[in-house]
Image: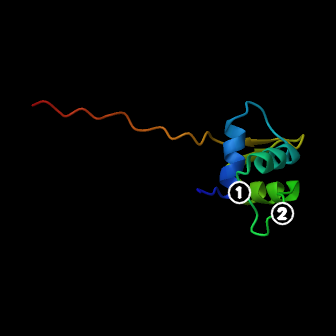
Amino acid sequence: MFKLTLHEAIASVLESHNRPLSANELADEINSRRLYVRKDGALLRSGQIHARVNKYPHLFIKDENGGITLKLSLIHISEPTRQAEIS
């Protein structure tokens, strides 16, 4: 089974919502969807969400109300296909 890192799991949940989420909401959804499982098997806590968001400021934004959003969309956008030059 493919396992996500915690910051990948946070990003995945944020990508599926159109609004900022609190650390509690993120932890609840990540736990319920089993997107990330701690090594000791315990449930993910909101404090771990805050710690990971703070560790990756290039990925996440915390607003003044405690909401967390993605800084940039993580959806991969491929380059346009290059056409061969005709001489």
Q: Residues within 10 Å of mark 2 (few under 14, many from 20)?
A: few
Residue beneath label 2, please?
42
Q: Tag on residue 56?
A: none
- Three-letter code, disc 1: Leu
Q: Residue at x 77, y 32 (%)?
A: 19
- Image quarter (top left, top right, bottom left or bottom right) of the C terminus: top left
The secondary structure type at the circle numbered 2 is: loop
Mark 2 residue type: Ala
Residue at screen point 72% across, 56% down? 36
Counting residues from the start of the chain, the first of labels 1 and 2 encountered is: 1
Relative horizontal placement of residue 83, taking residue 29 as reference (left or right) = left
Residue 71 sits in quarter? top right
The relative height of residue 39 versus residue 44 in the rendered view (above or below) is below
Residue 51 in which image quadrant: bottom right
The crowding category of the residue bearing disc 1, from other C-alpha atoms within 10 Å (few below 14, some 14 to 19, many at least 20), is some
Q: Is residue 80 above or below residue 62?
A: above
Residue 9 location (% of width, % of height): 69, 50
Determine whether the residue tagged by mark 1 lies in a helix, strand or loop: helix
What colour-coding does the image apply? rainbow
Q: Residue furthest right?
A: 65
Whether residue 70 appears in this view of the structure is no
Which quadrant would the N terminus be assigned to in this image?
Answer: bottom right
Residue reaching furthest to the left: 87
80 and 42: which one is in front?
Answer: 42
Q: Residue furthest front?
A: 1
Residue 6 badge: 1
* Mark-to-mark CA distance, 1 and 2: 14 Å
Could you tell me residue 14's position as x and y percent? 72, 40
